[in-house]
Amino acid sequence: DVKVTQSSRYLVKRTGEKVFLECVQDMDHENMFWYRQDPGLGLRLIYFSYDVKMKEKGDIPEGYSVSREKKERFSLILESASTNQTSMYLCACRWGNSPLHFGNGTRLTVT
Amino acid sequence: SQQGEEDPQALSIQEGENATMNCSYKTSINNLQWYRQNSGRGLVHLILIRSNEREKHSGRLRVTLDTSKKSSSLLITASRAADTASYFCATARGSNYKLTFGKGTLLTVNP
């Protein structure tokens, strides 16, 4: 089974802080994704990466950036956290066009 | 706007009953997938149905796809309390099989 590990389950940050959310997968999958999940809005794609150093914007990339220096690690960066970025963040990976494997999520609160 | 929309938003049934959830979408798809999410956790893939398939089974799960109506249904038979979770449909479109999720159906199975 694919294991997707997100570094923190819960995170509390202050407005204006730079925030790093880390995600590591153990199956050499080339595709990795960051979603955010909000009540009533479902999952929305922030960014995805199809290879090392490659990235593409998803549906809501504003206020976020990503980094993929190694195949197994995909980081989501909030350059200057704002309260409207309080959310559940979910990382996922997949091989080719196969279904997604998700991590357990990071619940971020920005105060 | 969301590509997939689940219906109903919430469903409460007794153990042993069947649960049916529906998903509608707007544009042509490569495949449609159903995921499950336990409270506070990541999503887990349940079943995938390709656009040229009409029905698929996996254990107590039955998925149907009607591309003419742009809709799918997920049936869970003989439900158990452990089936309590949120269920999401996701549609895969385009050459990169971009996945778009609906807002989910919250299923509660009462013992």
Image: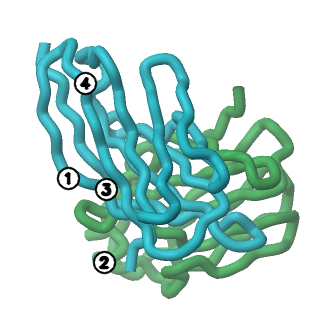
Chain colours: A green, B cyan
Contact? badges 3 and 2 (CB < 8 Å): no
The amino acid at mark 4 is: Asn
In the image, which disc is placed on residue B9?
1
Quarter assignment of residue B87: top left
The amino acid at mark 2 is: Asn
Looking at the image, the residue that sits furthest to the front is: B68
Same-subunit check for callouts 3 and 4:
yes
Contact? badges 1 and 3 (CB < 8 Å): yes
In the image, which disc is placed on residue B6?
3
Mark 3: few, some, or many residues within 10 Å (few <14, many ≥20)?
many
The amino acid at mark 1 is: Gln
Q: Is residue B26 left or right of residue B79?
A: right
In the image, which disc is placed on residue A5?
none
Q: Secondary structure at mark 2?
A: helix
Q: Secondary structure at mark 4?
A: loop
User: Which quarter shows the N terminus of chain A?
Assistant: top right
Q: Nearer the viewer, mark 3 or mark 4?
A: 4
Looking at the image, the residue that sits furthest to the bottom is: A62
Residue occupying the point 47% across, 42% down? B64
Estimate the spatial distance between the alpha carbons at disc 2 and disc 1, rounded to whole Å: 24 Å
Mark 4: few, some, or many residues within 10 Å (few <14, many ≥20)?
some
